[in-house]
Image (cartoon, helix red, strand yellow):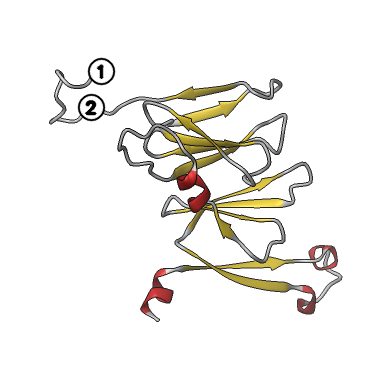
Amino acid sequence: QQQMMKKGILVLFFLSALLLIGQGSMDDIQKFTTYIDGTVVETVFCGYKNDVILLLTDKSEVYRTTDWKSYSSLAKQMNDIEYDDDGEEIGGVSSIKISNTDKNLVLFTGTHGVSWVSENCGKTLKVLKLSKPIHEVKFHPTERSWLLASSWKNCDDDYDEDEEECVKNK
């Protein structure tokens, strides 16, 4: 029971068009409940018909649904992709971005320098191993595979300048 308390509860309400224009009743509302690992911090509709929902939680985990009822975590798929990890932690997802020109093309930016890209709304993933986490990203408005991304490393007081490069701006 304590484990159930730690999980977030996601409740979705689907209102019929009749209810939205004032001609429906509360009986027209469909309610579905699913359990996820935390609080939802980002919700993204994906696909040409916006028929896929991607949820990002405060635990950096992504959930996907195509029926609005059952959600599956992408964590196992993200962790199972082979890449040269050098023993580094993979991390989780910090944001979800959809291409402006292809609503199936999704970038999942990572928290530890590993990001993922999907050409089918998260059904399958490819890894992008980068040297630093992506902090900001924007897809090009007309070119499908172009995006502008920025990355930086914050300098703290105990960084070793002989081991790593770091620039401080004042």
Q: Element type at marker 2? A: loop
Residue that numbered label 1 is attached to: 167
Above or below for 99 versus 92: above
Where residue 132 appears, as percent x and y from the top left, is 37, 28
Circle 2: residue type: Cys
Q: Residue furthest bottom?
A: 1
Above or below for 133 versus 24: above
- Using the rendered image of the protein, determine whether residue 71 is visible from the camera's viewpoint: yes
Q: Are marks 1 and 2 in contact (CB under 8 Å)?
A: yes
Circle 1: residue type: Val
Which residue is at 48% across, 51% downward? 75
Left-right relation of 57 to 147: left
Which residue is more in the foreground, 48 or 124?
A: 124
Spatial CA span between label 1 and label 2: 7 Å
Residue that numbered label 2 is attached to: 155
Quarter in which the N terminus is drawn = bottom left
- Closer to the chain start, of discs 1 and 2, is 2
Q: Residue 14 got which mark?
A: none
To which quarter of the image does residue 111 belong? top left
Above or below for 40 versus 110: below
